[in-house]
Image (spheres, rainbow, N blue to C red):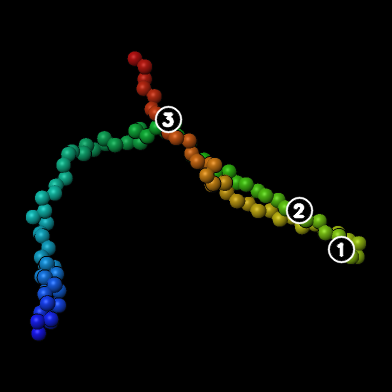
Amino acid sequence: MRRLTIALLPALVFTSACSGDVPERADDAREAEGEVLGGSISDDMLPLDQLQSQSPPIREERTVTATDNEDGSSSVETIVTVTSGDGADNQPAPPQPPQTPES
């Protein structure tokens, strides 16, 4: 009996810590702070004149195989492998700091 009590005591402690009480939203002390003004965020804030969008270059590798057949004819096989160049050598340039207008 004593072993059973010792074995069940930790389980009882852990399950008693798990209560089903969920705090109400009114008890939540978090509130939004600050003021958002209408029209204060626009695309004019983006440095579009400094950005360029471009895809990685496409690389083509051609393999040509010529074979002479026994009957005197020849055949040519061309294999074209196309891969995008999105490797480590095509990393974008770091962004330039914004230029400040001179006074």
Label 1, residues with CA under 10 Å away: few <14, some 14-19, many ≥20: few
Position of 19 with respect to 78 (left or right) is: left
Q: Residue 23: where, in percent of width, then height? A: 10, 60
Whether residue 20 is visible here, answered yes or no, is: no
The residue at which mark 2 appears reads as: 64
Task: Give me the C-alpha separation between circle 1 and circle 2.
Answer: 16 Å
The residue at which mark 1 appears reads as: 69
Viewer-closest of 69 and 39:
69
Which structural element holds mark 1? loop
Identified by mark 1, the residue type is Asn
Position of 23 with respect to 57 (left or right) is: left
Callout 2 touching callout 3 (CB < 8 Å): no
**Can you tell which quarter of the image residue 42 is in?**
top left
Residue drawn at x 65%, y 53% as measured from the top left: 81
Q: Is residue 77 above or below residue 46?
A: below
Q: Residue furthest front?
A: 2
The residue at which mark 3 appears reads as: 96
**Can you tell which quarter of the image residue 51 is in?**
top left
Label 3, residues with CA under 10 Å away: few <14, some 14-19, many ≥20: few
Q: Is residue 103 above or below residue 86?
A: above
Residue drawn at x 39%, y 28% as measured from the top left: 97
Viewer-closest of 35 and 75:
75
Q: Quadrant of the N terminus?
A: bottom left
Identified by mark 3, the residue type is Gln
Say whether disc 2 or disc 3 marks the residue closer to the N-terminus: 2
